Image (tube, helix red, strand yellow):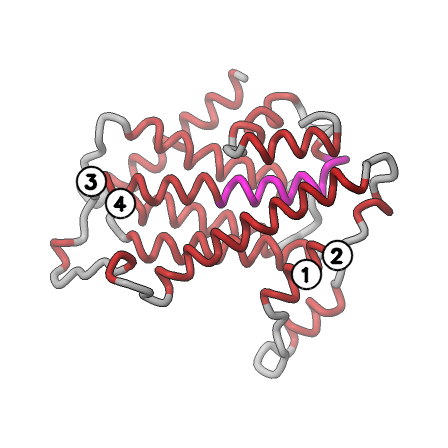
Amino acid sequence: MQKSNTIISSQIESIRESLSLYNVSLENDSDEKLTILVKGIISVKIFSNCSEEDNYIKEIISNLNQFSILSFLGFRVASMVLLRRCLENVLSSIYYREHKIEYIKKELDSDKRNFNKIDDLLNYFIEYPYTHFYKNIEINHITSLITKVKSKWEELYKKLSKYVHSSSTSYLDLHNFLDEIKYDNDKMQECIVLYKEVITIINTIFIIFFFKKYNLLEEEKKIIIRDSIYNNDIKRKIIEVFKNI
C-alpha cells in the first residue's frame, strides 16, 4: 500500500496547489474529503487500464477532476452537473465498448445522428446477458445486484437532475456577485455525499463488466476500488455474485 499512499498523497497535494491559486482556505477536516475525492479518481483510472481506448471513461475522469476543484471553490450546481454526466458516461461506456460501429457512426456524423436515450442505455445495462459471460454465477444473485444498481442509478440521476433543472430553491445557488461564490462547508458536504454515491455506482458497474480483469489486479489497486464503494449492501451483493471483491 506504500506506493498507493504515495500516489494518493501526491494527488491530494496537486489539488491543494490548484486551490491555493484561488486563495481557498481549507477546513481542518479537508484531508478526509480530499482522500475520498482522490481515491475515487484513481479507482476509475485503474479501470481505464482494464478497457480498450474509451473516451467515456476518460471523460468520467475529467469530470471527477473538475469536480474536485469546483466543489471546493463553491460551484455546487456546476459540480452536481458533472456528477450527472458521470452517470450518463458510465452507461455510454459499457454500451459503446461493444457497439464500435455505432460509436464510429456517431463520431463521423454527430449532428445528424440520433443519440441513444438514457432509458435505452439503462435498459442495455439491465438486459445484458451476464450469465453468458460468467458461467458460474447464479441468476438470482446477478439479477438482485443489477436491480439494486439500476434503482440507485435512477435515484441519483433524479436527484442530480434537480440541480440541472432548478427544481426548487433548494437546488439553486443564487449568487448575485462573484465574491459570494466561495467555499461553504455544508454545501461541500452535500457534494461529497453525492460524490460517494456516484463513485460507488461507477465502480460497481465496472466491476460487473471487467471482473475478470479486476480479479487479476494487484491487491493494493483492489483496495482502492473497494474503498471507493461506500454502499455495504452493494458490496455484499457483489460478493454474492462473484464470491469476492
**Res 202 quadrant in image:** top right
**Few, some or many C-alpha atoms within 10 Å of disc 1 (few <14, some 14-19, many ≥20)?**
few
Name the secondary structure under disc 4. Answer: helix
Q: Is residue 239 above or below residue 67?
A: above
In 3D space, how far apart are the residues under numbered discs 2 and 4 (Cα atoms)?
Answer: 37 Å
Residue 175 appears in the picture as rendered: yes
Which SS does the magenta portion mostly show? helix
- Of badges 1 and 3, the one in the foreground is 1
Please report the residue visible at 36 percent of the width from the left and 67 percent of the height from the top: 165
Q: Earlier in the sequence, mark 3 or mark 2?
A: 3
Q: Nearer the viewer, residue 205 or 212?
A: 205
Residue 172: quadrant of the picture: bottom left
Mark 3 vs mark 2: give the one in front.
2
Tag 1: amino acid: Asn
Please state the extent of the stretch shown in magenta in the rendering. Answer: 198-213
Q: Which label belongs to residue 187? A: 4
Give how far apart the Cα atoms at labels 1 and 3 are: 42 Å
Q: CA distance from mark 3 to mark 2?
A: 46 Å
**Farthest top residue?**
2
Amino acid under label 4? Lys
Q: Nearer the viewer, residue 142 or 124?
A: 142
